[in-house]
Image (spheres, helix red, strand yellow):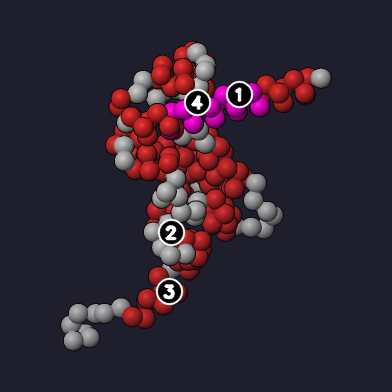
Amino acid sequence: MTGTTTGRRERKKAQTRQALTDAAVRLFTERGFDNVGVREVAEAADVSLSTLFKHFPGKEALVFDLDTDIESALVAAVRDRAPGQTVLHALRDHMVRTRTAVLTDDPTFVLVESTPALRDYARSMWLRHEKALAAALAEATGLAREDPAVAGLARFTLESPSVARASEDPARTMHDLFTLLEHGWAATPLAGREYHPGRDG
């Protein structure tokens, strides 16, 4: 009975969060982020203002319902990787699987890209994810989270989607980016095409 009750409660919470996010994105898109208050979002989702703040810490967070899930999945990609799999390959596979979809016509993507406050929030959110990932990498490797290898891999992982999504084949590009990190510039086809001023005329 307890398990059934807990499951029902979690489903209700998820439904409430989704209703709030849907209402927020719709209202922000229709009227502009700065022209909508959190009370209006709560009313549109048919919940109280106190309920809204139980689920989201602020107005910007309403747009990023999956914030916690994204961070948890990044950390799990490292901690729960298959036996014998390197952290680099685990992160590569995770990013190819979850972060290469091109969402340029998605209402939330369009809203965030067109709203400075949301872009800033997304950036700060991504930095929090980076710190969490660095902590997981430090734990997995025995290095300090400030170690350049740990900090660099965490930053690379979080920035790679912006490069991959700009290409014609995001999944392939994401894979190639991690290959570049693993094997270095010398292993890429471009390495043999470098132009050297003075030497090459």
Distance in Å between CA atoms under marks 3 and 4: 46 Å
N-term mark: 4 or 1: 1
Report if residue 142 lies within the magenta region. no
Looking at the rendering, which quadrant does residue 17 occupy? Answer: top right
Distance in Å between CA atoms under marks 1 and 2: 34 Å
Question: Label 4 is placed on what type of residue?
Answer: Leu
Q: Is residue 136 left or right of residue 62?
A: right
Residue for badge 4? 20
Residue 181 in view here: no
Residue 13 is tagged as 1
Residue for badge 2? 164
Distance in Å between CA atoms under marks 2 and 4: 31 Å
**On screen, 16 above or below 49?**
below
N-term mark: 1 or 2: 1
Magenta segment: 11-25
Q: Which dot, 3 or 4, sits closer to the camera?
A: 4
Residue 130 is tagged as none
Q: Which dot, 4 or 1, sits closer to the camera?
A: 4
Q: Secondary structure at mark 3?
A: loop
